[in-house]
Every structure is written in C-alpha cells, then in structure tokens.
Image: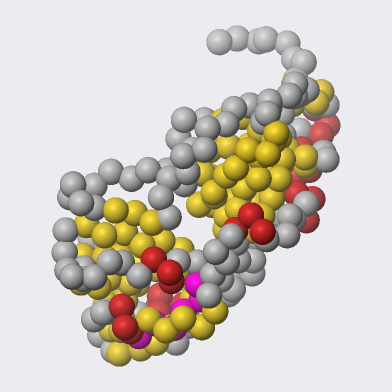
Amino acid sequence: ITYPELQRGGYDSQWVEIRGVVRAISAEFQRVVVDIDAGGLFQAHLPRPSAEPLPLSILHSRVRVRGVAGTVLNHNEEIVGARLFVPAFDSFTVLQEGVTEPFSLPIQPLAEFQAPDAAQSAKRTHVRGVVSLRWPNGKVFIQEEGRGLEIEVIQARKFNDPEGSFHPGASPVAFEVGDRIDAVGYPANRKSKPVLEEAEVRVIAPAVGIRADPLQPSLALDARKGARLVEVHASFIEQ
C-alpha cells in the first residue's frame, strides 16, 4: 500500500506491506519504534529484541516492511494518523542500502535546494555553508553564495528507561557562528519554507567574519532573502 492509503485508515487491522526509508530507530523498555518516510512519516512498532542488538544497518536504507496497519485517533475518535505493528525485524527487507559515509554525497548548492514531492520519500542531501545563527534547540542557519537555509541538527533525546536509545545519535560536533560546515540530512518543507531535518554536521573551516546584508523594505518578503543574516534600518515607534 501507499502512505496516503495507510493514513486514510481503510486498511486498519489488516496485514499490509509498505515501502519507505528508515529515518530513525528508538528503543525504550520492551518496545522499538522505527520512523519511516514513505512520502510522509509514520512509525512502525515492534517488540524489543532481548538477546540481539538493534539492526542499525537498516538506518537510512530503503526498505519494504510488513505488518498490521493501525490508526491513530484523537479524543473525538477522528483519524489523525496511522502506524504499523510489526512482529519482528525479519519483517523488514532492505531494498537499497543507505550510504555509510554521508559526507561522500555530492554537495547540493543552496540555490538548488528543494524538498521532494509529497508522494516521494526524502533522500539525504549534503549542503555546505557558513553558520549565521545557532540556537540551543538545535536550529541552525547557514548561508552560501547569496542563499540561506535552516537546518535542524540531531538532538539528544531523554528516556525514562536508563537503557533507552535513539539512533542516529546526537552529533557531538561543536561549532559556532562563522564556521563553515557540511550538513547531511533530509529535505522538507516547513510552513512553505525549505529546511534540512535530522542533520549530521562536520566543521570544514574555522570561524571567519560574517557580514549582515542590508535589507530594503521592498525586499522583506523576497524568498531569496530567507534564512540569511540581514540588517534592517528602521525607526522605533513604541514598545
């Protein structure tokens, strides 16, 4: 089945198969959750294997997974999502292995960066730029050759289970404003603006001075100015 068919709920409680890209694997207590992108994100739930390690080799791979479809309901009994209940990891079949060296992927210029069509799984994308802003929540902005991009760096997750784990893990790389970095993650549209999600980062050059571009009021809504460091001259009216 397809992601829209899974989301509509018509296959609820039926044995189905669906194809997509494994984005993340988390384990807590006796449950494992696998985040899968099949043109939209959903989760596959399965028992945590007690005697075997998690099969992390399926991360970022394109897979076919079989299980029982289930719906997610809100308090009004309305369908708001879907998930898959999978008996074991042997219900996953790898169709195309993920890239083991993500920074070996070709660099995509920021001017050409775009999210995939809604019906397609996102493919990991490699971008490069100078850090113009970094927030503690993992949100980072980079710019290069007159274009900017918002990046969400992988963050550590907290678990109630002391043996809980999340893969891929948070990036241990330290960087600051002005550093030139490489980032590899999944393109997406967030409120009609492009963003790179679940990004791994490496620093390729230390911090340099970064200049803010003057922003004219007539260009304030220009999409090409999005995610870039700018300065605005204006009159203060009131607080």
Quadrant of the rendered image containing residue 177: top right
Identify the main secondary structure in magenta.
Answer: strand
In the image, residue 230 above or below residue 182: above
Q: Name the spot of residue 22 as percent of width and height, x first.
A: 45, 69
Q: Is residue 34 left or right of 186 when viewed as pictured?
A: left
Q: Can you say which quadrant of the picture contains the C terminus?
A: top right
Q: Residue at x 73, y 24 (%)?
A: 208
Between residues 40 and 60, which one lies in front from this camera angle?
60
Q: Is residue 217 magenta?
A: no
Q: Residue at x 18, y 47 (%)?
A: 162
Q: Name the spot of residue 115 as percent of width and height, x first.
A: 65, 60
Colour scheme in use: secondary structure
Q: Residue at x 52, y 38 (%)?
A: 173
Q: Can you say which quadrant of the picture contains the N terminus?
A: bottom left
Quadrant of the rendered image containing residue 71: bottom left
Between residues 64 and 117, which one lies in front from this camera angle?
64
Q: How many marks?
A: 0
The answer to whether residue 189 is seen in the rendering is no
In the image, residue 49 above or below residue 93: above
Q: Residue at x 68, y 29 (%)?
A: 206
In the image, residue 3 above or below residue 102: below
Between residues 165 and 77, which one lies in front from this camera angle?
165
Span shown in magenta: 61-66
The answer to whether residue 94 is seen in the rendering is yes
